[in-house]
Amino acid sequence: MIRTMILATAVAAATSVCAQNTTEVPALSDMAGDYLVLNSQEYNGVKNLASMKAFTISPSGSATLTMSGFYMTGCLDFDAEYNEKNGGISITSGTPVYDMDTYMVYLYPWDTENDVEIVRPIEYTYAGNDTWESDNDIMVVAVQGEERQTSTFANGSSIVRCNGTSGNISYVGSAGSQDEYIESRPCYVTIKGNHIDIYNVLQADQYGYGVHLSGTFDAQTGEAMLDYTLTGYANDGTYRILTGCEYDEATNMPTGMSYPDTNNMGKIHAVIDLENGRLTLDPMAIWVAEYDAGSGSITVNENMLFEFVKTVNVEYDANSSAVTTIESVDNGTAAKEVLRVDYYTIDGRKIAEPQEGSLVIRVTVYKDMTTKKEKTVFMSNR
């Protein structure tokens, strides 16, 4: 079956992933772990989130970080300078990121107006909450002898420390001859009010780039609805689109998009456990789609399937997901008896006594073991 949807709904718009800033800069020794690089690209004057890639950071010297997997799967490791005073990450201009035997690939900050590389380093500035921002245009430059080819890596980029893990079971192939894939990857979850974003929830391609899902939830019921999204392009010029789906248990195959002929067509239903930081998504499918630039619509061919994503489970640190105010209690909290009050930094570390005027997550624990979480500025007279 062929179904048409408006592309504006399918394209992930640019989303700020910065939580409220903290002034505490991570020490070099604390920088080890999984991260995402989130790259924006500009189209018609508007910057949108264009790609995300999981990579790892390892301290490798007195002021040096080794970045592994920063560009794509199988790319070269490289070192970046780290400033413990201000949290800045500095990547040398012209850093080699891929060796293709017959040519090399380099990363450059770019002067877009004059279409030339910049000799100064690519600078990522610490923005708080384990988030780094770069305003640079960044270019990938492939060099083979005297020939150079360029492609845009980012028109502005962010680095965020992963705060969760996404795991899925997927199937590729037709009924009776399917290949099963069991996968797990680091991810990044943000919650702002009743809006949730999950970055790197699936792997989009063989190069290691990930998928972003965005939607809203009901804090009382735990029901969430996430938007369908583009995941990439095929060699024949068609698109790949990820949607919620209905499926047949006997054949283990999708039968069509979720919620057909409704305003929620193609959306992905999920259940969220806010207290424990868990998200369970209903089955999804990646279909072949074609884009009509004239009408601004995308047409999904439900008869042409790339992948059936049967299960997706996301676990994340509920105390470092940029929560605003999330309550697991009913409206009668005023009558409940308080057992204790705990304080956490914005990046999720428990602290005994916050500094006056610092931004913290205050967790009130009641005697019936329900809790209330609030992001607040700590004042000793509270």
Image: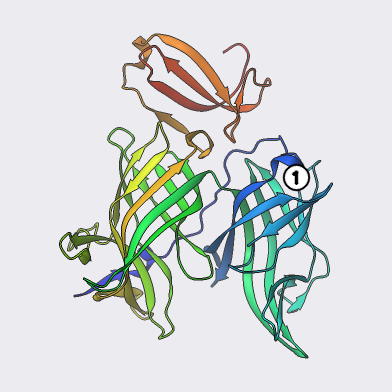
Q: Is residue 344 above or below residue 237?
A: above
Looking at the rendered structure, the secondary structure element under dot 1 is loop
- Quarter of the picture containing the C terminus is top right
Lateral position of residue 181 relative to residue 40, left or right: left
Q: Which residue is mark 1?
A: 87
Front in this rendered view, residue 119 or 381: 119
Q: Is 59 drawn above or below residue 178 in the view shown?
A: above
Of 69 and 221, nearer the camera is 69
Q: Is residue 214 left or right of residue 345?
A: left
Image coordinates of residue 81 in percent, x first then y, are 80, 54
Q: What quarter of the picture does the N terminus occupy?
A: bottom left
Q: Where in the figure is residue 239, as x and y percent of width and height?
A: 39, 76
Amino acid on which the number 1 mark rests in the picture: Gly
Report which quarter residue 233 is drawn in: bottom left
Instruction: State the residue at coordinates (59%, 36%).
Output: 347
| Residue 204, quarter of picture | bottom left
Q: Is residue 45 visible?
A: no
Q: Nearer the viewer, residue 282 or 358?
A: 282
Instruction: Bin the neighbour count of mark 1 within 10 Å (Cα to Cα): few under 14, some 14-19, many 20 and up.
Output: many
| x 15%, y 62%: residue | 250
